[in-house]
Amino acid sequence: MSDDDLAQRLVLQGRITAFVRAFGLHQPDQTPCGTPIPTSEAHALGELDRDGPLTQSTLAQRLRLEKSTVSRLVGQLIGRGWVRRAEHDGDARLVWLEVTPEGHRAAGQLAAARAARFEQLLHNIPADQRPVVIDALTTLVEAAAGPEHQAGQSPTTQAGTA
């Protein structure tokens, strides 16, 4: 690794760390938009609300989490009354996760808070810099996802949850 690469790596590390903290991603019990639930629960609920019902395995793939982590996460969502397990298409071998009416309401509240947070964030970026910022974030997401995710479905096309 060259001195230039090392310097750039350290700057990138510092900038990402600063963003994580400024945006609130390091807070375990609330989303960056200020909703008092863990970000992982918000992401799971968002996926299920948008595209559900889904199997737990599909949800794990989408969230890029281990199955055991998603199992605990689903248990938390069920405990909140936001998700239920159900059979789908009469196949008892597969358990599907569905959002409850309470879960749809919670997902709607999360979406409204997320929209307000991103409106504020966008407003704080000078208009002439917005395309550059969005392009840089796209590049960063693709780099973080790795080459195996760059072919086919791009993580940049999926709706974000904050």
Image: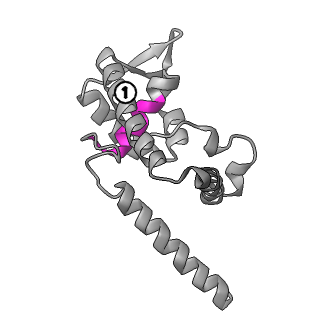
Residue 102 pos. (x, y %): 28, 19
User: Residue at 52% across / 47% down in the picture?
Assistant: 64
Q: From this view, report whether residue 81 is shown above or below residue 27.
A: above
Q: Quadrant of residue 86?
A: top left
User: Residue at 42% across / 39% down in the picture?
Assistant: 43
Q: Which residue is mark 1?
A: 107
Q: Quadrant of residue 72?
A: top left
User: Residue at 44% across / 42% down in the picture?
Assistant: 118
Location of the N terminus (image quadrant): bottom right
Q: Which residue is the extreme one toward the top?
A: 90
The amino acid type, in three-letter code, at marker 1 is Ala
Residue 111 pos. (x, y %): 40, 30
Asked whether residue 63 is in view, the answer is yes
Q: Which residue is the extreme one toward the right?
A: 151
Q: Secondary structure at mark 1?
A: helix
Magenta segment, which residues? Answer: 37-47
Location of the C terminus (image quadrant): top left
User: Residue at 41% across / 60% down in the picture?
Assistant: 20
The secondary structure that most of the magenta stretch takes on is helix
Q: Is residue 138 magenta?
A: no
Residue 50 pos. (x, y %): 49, 25
User: Is disc 1 surrounded by few (<14), some (14 to 19) or many (20+) residues within 10 Å?
Assistant: many
Q: Is residue 160 left or right of residue 107?
A: right
Asked whether residue 162 is in view, the answer is no
